[in-house]
Amino acid sequence: MRRFVLESDGRRRTVSLGARVGTVGAQGDVWRIVDAPGHVAKILRSSHRDRLDERLDALAALRPTDPDRVAWPVARVLSPGDEALVGLAMPYLSPATHRPLTDVLRGPRKGPDRTFATAAADLAGTLARLHRAGVVVGDLAPANVLTTRQARLTLIDADGWQLPGRPGRPPLPCPFSRDEYKAPELLGRPPGVARTDFSDRWALAVIVAELLVGLHPFAGVAPDAPPPYDEVANVEAGRCWLLGHPMTLPDAGPPPKPPASVQRLFEACFGPGRTDPRHRPTASAWAYALSEAAA
């Protein structure tokens, strides 16, 4: 059983790590803390510890922004020998109460459309508050969102966000994002490239579409389109079935139609917003329209 030191508010204590949580991660692994059952420790690989102290300070300052919708770090994790900073501790969100949003999207649709609109509005509201605080999530994707039965969504992996740096220092970069949720201007760009909230707006619109209609807005195969047949190729070519482009979609029945007010936001984001990010609706605009749709 491995032992580490937790540091919080100037106090330190030694703890033991138990079972791994989830699968092996690209940036690090998450482990249950035996001595603190309500928390887990994320031990980062050495290649992902650059400016970690600065990153955790930034997250601590941001925590009052949205205390209930983000799995905020609550302590630093130090190695027991040299007391080097190697990770962070955060609340344990049990699978009994929190499911990955990916499971909800991939499984059979259960519950009324209002439930999915409520979840989408909740996510948009959280993102709006983070954007006002100067945060760019960067890797905004269903894999980094957990949901409860009441459609309350929680963002995880906050340590991978693009955050404001200390005075005189550049922003802390987001090291990774998934291609199927990546804004068009970021496709093919190197990891860690500087982002703006415009890229989050794109990812949010994609997730909202998946929640409301059960399908990626750039899914499907266009007539006579050359391979590859995937969402990224369709984004680059501007082929969006949700905007009326002829596409052969997965055989799951006709997707439901979003409310007119929400459809207008999709059209702005995936139409002119595909090449000009300034046309992408803000997270606040999404939160307002989706809240009305859920009412």
Image (cartoon, helix red, strand yellow):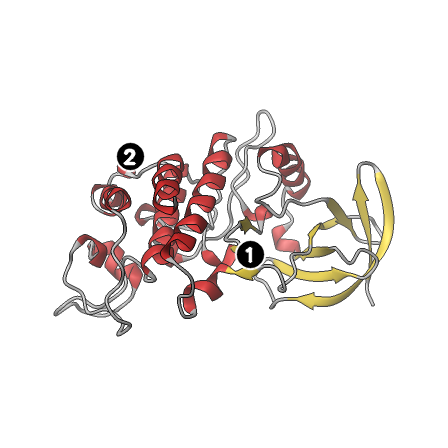
Asked whether 275 or 211 is in front, the reply is 211
**Residue carrying label 1:** 148
> What is the three-letter code of the residue carrying label 2?
Arg
> What is the three-letter code of the residue carrying label 1?
Thr
Q: Earlier in the sequence, mark 2 or mark 1?
A: 1
Separation of residues labelled 2 and 1 (CA atoms): 33 Å
The residue at the point 83 percent across, 50 percent down is 82
Question: Is 239 located above or below residue 165 in the figure?
Answer: below
- The nearer-to-camera label among 2 and 1 is 1
Residue 246 rendering spot, x and y as whole percentages: 14, 62
**Residue carrying label 2:** 278
State the image quarter where residue 241 is shown. Answer: bottom left
Secondary structure at numbered mark 1: loop
Question: Is 22 located above or below residue 133 in the figure?
Answer: below
Asked whether 183 or 22 is in front, the reply is 22
Residue 18 rendering spot, x and y as whole percentages: 77, 66
